[in-house]
């Protein structure tokens, strides 16, 4: 069975925490895939009937679209213990996926550029204010249909948090046009922003909290600003057209790991 476990140190931890114990307990061989599966990749696998992963991982927005396109198998929750389901937070029990993890996109300071003694941008409107807070920035690009800096752009443009949705896409991109000359790198994957922060590639970043904390633990001059951070939820899903036995095994490892 081929299971997406994401990448970096998270993948290493996932393999030790549940992949190896699951193999030992069940005798089912698992091939962990330290990568992500985009909506386009998932759609191609299903359309061509050449599914290369049995359990994919996707953020909840990507998984929702995939489910609407009939790319995912529905989860059979009857195989799980009631007490385990009752103890599981609601968002982790979707019809088409079981919660894997949650993380955040946060604003991160390079403390060499923005030490605690210096005025720092706090809300996203100040991240956009390059006159008051000069220096280069980074933002996630969102090009794979995953989370992009859409909410951040709207917040920077004065939209109230409770008025973000339905999202004004034209306004978001107009706001991004304003900050674009000051973006050194539009990053796409976690390893990319981790390397940028490690190399002190900007004065202030948009980054994953987990990647940032890893670098902080290693001594990098970074500090997380949690104000107006975005919470992202990841689901593990079973792709359509898998052999039935593989979907059953996929359900077993999801329950073993997360319920």
Image (cartoon, grey):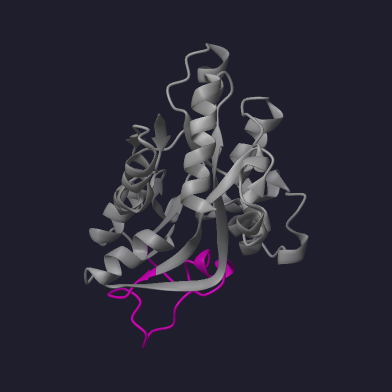
Q: Give the quarter of the image for residue 248.
A: top right
Specify the quadrant that holds the N terminus: top left
- Whole-percent x and y of residue 151? 63, 56
Left or right side of 42 for 216:
left
Left or right side of 116 for 63:
right
Residue at 44%, 83% in the rendered image: 119
- Whole-percent x and y of residue 188? 42, 43
Which residue is at the front of the view, 105 or 41?
Answer: 41
Left or right side of 18 for 67:
right
- Whole-percent x and y of residue 25? 37, 44
Magenta stretch containing residue 102, yes or no? no
Residue at 57%, 60% in the rendered image: 231
- Whole-percent x and y of residue 249? 49, 32
Which residue is at the front of the view, 36 or 246?
Answer: 246
Magenta stretch containing residue 129, yes or no? yes
Residue at 34%, 32% in the rendered image: 29
Residue at 25%, 60% in the rendered image: 198
Dominant secondary structure (helix, strand or loop) of the stretch shown in magenta: loop
Left or right side of 123 for 257:
left
Q: Which residues are drawn in magenta?
A: 109-136
Residue 45, can we see it? yes
């Amino acid at each position: 069975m081929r299971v997406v476990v994401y990448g970096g140190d998270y993948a290493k931890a996932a393999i030790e925490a549940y992949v190896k114990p699951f193999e030992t307990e069940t005798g089912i061989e698992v091939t962990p895939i330290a990568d992500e599966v985009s909506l386009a990749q998932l759609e191609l696998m299903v359309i061509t009937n050449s599914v290369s992963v049995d359990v994919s991982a996707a953020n909840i927005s990507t998984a929702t679209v995939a489910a609407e396109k009939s790319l995912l198998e529905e989860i059979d929750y009857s195989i799980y213990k009631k007490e385990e389901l009752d103890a599981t937070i609601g968002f982790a029990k979707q019809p088409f996926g079981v919660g894997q993890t949650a993380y955040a996109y946060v604003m991160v300071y390079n403390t060499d550029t923005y030490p605690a003694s210096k005025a720092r941008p706090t809300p996203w409107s100040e991240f956009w204010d390059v006159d008051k807070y000069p220096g280069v920035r980074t933002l996630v690009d969102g090009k794979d249909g995953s989370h992009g800096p859409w909410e951040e752009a709207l917040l920077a443009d004065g939209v109230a948090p409770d008025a973000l949705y339905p999202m004004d896409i034209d306004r978001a991109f107009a706001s991004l046009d304003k900050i674009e000359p000051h973006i050194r790198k539009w990053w796409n994957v976690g390893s990319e922003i981790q390397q940028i922060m490690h190399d002190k590639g900007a004065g202030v970043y948009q980054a994953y909290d987990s990647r940032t904390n890893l670098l902080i633990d290693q001594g990098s001059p970074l500090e997380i600003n949690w104000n107006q951070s975005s919470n992202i939820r990841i689901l593990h899903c079973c792709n359509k057209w898998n052999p039935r036995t593989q979907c059953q095994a996929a359900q077993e490892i999801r329950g073993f790991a997360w319920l």
